[in-house]
Amino acid sequence: MRVNNLKLQFITHFTDKYSYIDSARVALEGGCRWIQLRMKDVPEATLAHHALIIQKMCKDYGATFIIDDNVHLVKKIKADGVHLGKNDMPISEARRILGNGFIIGGTVNCFEDILRITNSDESIVLGQQPMVNYFVCGPFRYTSTKKNLAPILGLEGYKNIISNMKRNNIDIPLVAIGGITKDDISDILKTGVDGIALSGSILRAENPVEEMKSIVEICKSFQNK
């Protein structure tokens, strides 16, 4: 499964001004077509409530809808997929539960993480379906929206990881994350990564919808690269 809409991902966030649902709406209105619902440490019912609302919004906009961590909720409501952090359910277990019809993304911080997953005896667990459909890799720089931050990568970090992936014939999309602003996007995409993931920087903008529209245009210029 080759995932669509990967070039620009938005991860839900909240501020004093915007709720999780508001943040997803802002991203969709601005043209982003990949939304990840990320709500840590909330009751299952609260997560499910938000998921159903945002899933409907994503369907209306033709956007991909991913839920962070909760594999069983993904299967229950038939979201497009799940994103798994390094301390979440093992990717291989998630693939067994979800089967072929769902997207699975995984968090990595270095090439060794990628190699460990792709060289696993379980790297292909169901026919021709890869265990993981994409990696999110970071942080690019310091970000306040993530706890227990891994070492910062910067542009050279992404260049080295992409080079190592090519050298080892690993053809899985890589998405950059972590403190990325609009001014960083072109330089990051020039490293060879397949996409970027944003969160807090959008909601901090004076006009988040217009900020997202501007970022969408930048990403479009790299769409076929």
Image (cartoon, grey):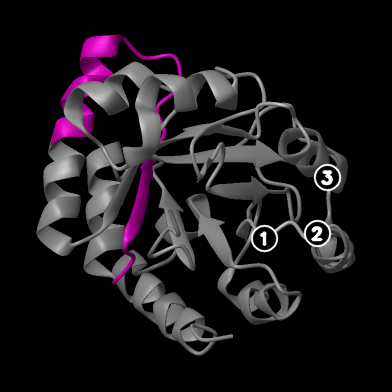
Q: Residue furthest bottom?
A: 221
Relative to 114, say whether 33 is above or below. Answer: below
Task: Indicate the amino acid at tag 3.
Answer: Cys
The nearer-to-camera label among 2 and 3 is: 2
Tell me the quarter of the image containing the C terminus. bottom right
The structure residue drawn at horizontal position 28% and vertical position 11%, both measured from the top left corner, is 44
Measure the alpha-carbon separation of dots 2 and 1.
Answer: 7 Å
Q: Considering only order in the chain, which callout, 1 or 3, is on the residue closer to the N terminus?
A: 3
The structure residue drawn at horizontal position 52% and vertical position 47%, both measured from the top left corner, is 133
Pointers 2 and 1 in contact (C-beta within 8 Å): yes
Residues packed near mark 1 inside 10 Å, few (<14), some (14 to 19) or many (20 plus):
few
* Secondary structure of the residue carrying numbered label 2: helix
Q: Which residue is mark 1?
A: 171
Horizontal and vertical percent position of residue 124 = 59, 36
Say which quarter of the image contains residue 163.
Answer: bottom right
Q: Classify residue 180 as left or right of residue 80.
A: right
Measure the alpha-carbon separation of dots 3 and 1.
Answer: 16 Å
Q: Considering only order in the chain, which callout, 1 or 2, is on the residue closer to the N terminus?
A: 2
Looking at the rendered structure, which numbered label has been put on residue 165?
2
